[in-house]
Image (cartoon, rainbow, N blue to C red):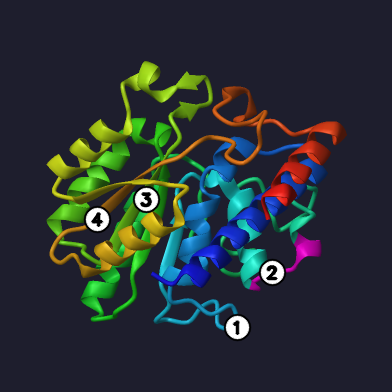
């Protein structure tokens, strides 16, 4: 594996985290915990894995990404800014009146957003449709769908999973951001969900399953490579992550599911990330 590339992706993930914090701090509103937990995954997707071009955001042959956990929009906007789809000054209007960068992403307002999301549980159904369309049209693009582990409590996810298997959507890769926390507590206590039994559930629905450390760039890259090589089955990557990753006072702290930092907290958080560069 290219060590230089791995280091570049680590730095990109760190910058994405800084962008996330700045968006939420400026807005005085947002979801930092679950946005920070998926930054490494998005770094690999957008800067190594997906076939995309910010100069042609609607190109027919591009790979597609569905952020089913739409409340983590600050993470998506951050990576779109780093990739060159939008500008820093734009995303700093996050969650402000009349901004195109709403609390949940809108495909009609933000270039690079492939699906409008927000209501949890619906993203996999849409991703199925995209992947099936590629099969019908004999196109080579792949579809990636990021779910939250708490989101798996939505029944529509499992209806969609049956469909993924039914149509042998091996061009579909689902990623579960398994940070073990949701709005009101631990997922394992609320609905008995953890990385291992999530993988078992998807496997019982006919998925090729991979469990990884969702903050290990090499493991993320390897998992996507294995997913591309898989045939006849959709793939799910269950990524073990930490909510609030990178910030000492946010890590594994459910209180940071959906609240903004004050000035002191913001400065401390940014300083912690800069020290990691």
**Label 1 to label 2, Cα distance in Å?**
11 Å
Mark before the other along the chain sequence, 2 or 4: 2
Task: Tell me the CA gap for discs 3 and 4.
Answer: 8 Å
> Which numbered disc flags the more N-terminal residue, 3 or 1?
1
Task: Provide the secondary structure element on which disc 2 rests.
Answer: loop
Q: Residue furthest front?
A: 3
Q: Give the mark, 3 or 4, whose residue is nearer the N terminus.
A: 3
**Residue 175: mark:** 3
Mark 1 or mark 4: name the one nearer the start of the chain. Answer: 1
- Is 226 located above or below residue 180 in the figure? below
Rounded to the nearest angstrom, the CA distance separating label 3 from label 1 is 26 Å
Q: Which residue is mark 2?
A: 86
Q: Which residue is mark 1?
A: 55
Sequence-wise, the earlier of marks 3 and 2 is: 2
Residues 202 and 94: in front is 202
The answer to whether residue 174 is left or right of residue 216 is left
Q: Residues within 10 Å of mark 3 (few under 14, many from 20)?
A: many
Find disc 4 in the rendering and name its residue.
235
């Amino acid at each position: 594996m290219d060590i230089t590339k791995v280091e570049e992706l680590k730095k990109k993930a760190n910058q994405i985290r800084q962008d996330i914090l700045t968006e939420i701090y400026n807005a005085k509103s947002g979801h930092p915990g679950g946005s920070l937990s998926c930054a490494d995954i998005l770094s690999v997707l957008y800067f190594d894995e997906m076939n995309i071009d910010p100069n042609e955001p609607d190109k027919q042959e591009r790979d597609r990404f569905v952020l089913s956990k739409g409340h983590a929009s600050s993470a998506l906007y951050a990576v779109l800014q780093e990739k060159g789809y939008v500008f820093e000054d734009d995303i700093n209007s996050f969650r402000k009146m009349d901004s195109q960068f709403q609390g949940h992403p809108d495909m009609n307002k933000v270039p690079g957003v492939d699906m409008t999301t927000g209501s949890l549980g619906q993203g996999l159904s849409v991703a199925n449709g995209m992947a099936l369309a590629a099969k019908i049209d004999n196109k080579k693009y792949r579809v990636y769908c990021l779910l939250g582990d708490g989101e798996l409590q939505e029944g529509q996810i499992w209806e969609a999973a049956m469909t993924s298997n039914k149509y042998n959507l091996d061009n579909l890769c689902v990623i579960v951001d398994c940070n073990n926390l949701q709005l009101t507590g631990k997922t394992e206590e609320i609905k008995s969900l953890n990385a291992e039994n999530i993988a078992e559930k998807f496997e019982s629905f006919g998925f090729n399953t991979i469990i990884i450390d969702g903050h290990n760039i090499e493991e993320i890259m390897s998992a996507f490579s294995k997913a591309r090589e898989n045939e006849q089955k959709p793939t799910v990557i269950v990524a073990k992550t930490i909510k609030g990753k990178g910030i000492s006072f946010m890590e594994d702290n459910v209180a940071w599911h959906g609240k903004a930092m004050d000035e002191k907290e913001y400065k401390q958080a940014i300083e912690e990330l800069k020290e990691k560069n």
